[in-house]
Image (spheres, rainbow, N blue to C red):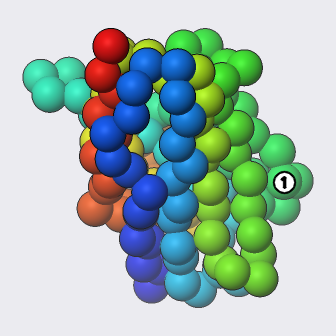
Amino acid sequence: QVQLVESGGGPVQAGGSLRLSCAYTNSVSIRCMGWFRQAPGKEREGVAKFSTGLGSADYADSVKGRFFVSQDNAKRTLYLQMNSLKPEDSAMYYCAADERFCAVVAGRGYAYWGRGTQVTVSS
C-alpha cells in the first residue's frame, strides 16, 4: 500500500512560483508518479509524469518550460516546481503513484492518489 500526502499549495500572484511536495510511503514499489490538477467544473488533467527509475519527466504542453519535477529519494518526496504561474494554473493539485512502469500507466489510471493541495493564482 502506498500513501501520498501533498503540501505546498497556497495563494500566489501571477508570475510567481510555488513548489509542491508529495511525500510517499513504500517507495521501493513505486515506478511511476504523476502530478495532476483539477479546476472547478473541469476534468482532472495530467500535468507531469515521472519515471522513478529513469528520473525523467514528461510534461503537458500547457506547463512545459514552466513546471519541473524532481525527486528526493532520501526524503521520499516528489516535488513540482511551478514557475511563471498564470491564473489558469489555479486548481487543486494531486499527486499519484503506481507500481507499474510509466509506459503502461495511461491517463488517470494510477493506483494511488493523494488528497490534493490547492493552488490559487491571482492576476
The x and y percentages for residue 41 are 12, 22
In the displayed image of the protein, which residue is found farthest to the right?
54
Please tell me which residue is depicted at 51% across the width and 53% down the height of the picture.
20
Give the quadrant of residue 40: top left
In the image, 21: left or right of 38?
Answer: right
- Where on the picture, by quarter, is residue 110? bottom left
Depicted 99 relative to depicted 62: above or below? below
Decide if residue 23 is on the left or right side of residue 32.
left
Q: Residue at x 32, y 53 (%)?
A: 117
x, y percent for residue 38: 28, 33
Q: Percent x, y for residue 103?
A: 70, 42
- In front of the other: 87 or 26: 87
Residue tagged 1: 55
Residue at image x 33%, y 13%? Answer: 123
**In this picture, is 41 found above or below 91?**
above
Q: Which of 3 and 68 is in front in this view?
A: 68
The single residue placed furthest to the left in the displayed view is 41
In the image, residue 91 above or below residue 84 = below
Instruction: Name the residue nearer the viewer: 19 or 30.
Output: 19
Give the class, few, some or many, for how many residues have Cα within 10 Å of label 1's Cα (few <14, many ≥20).
few
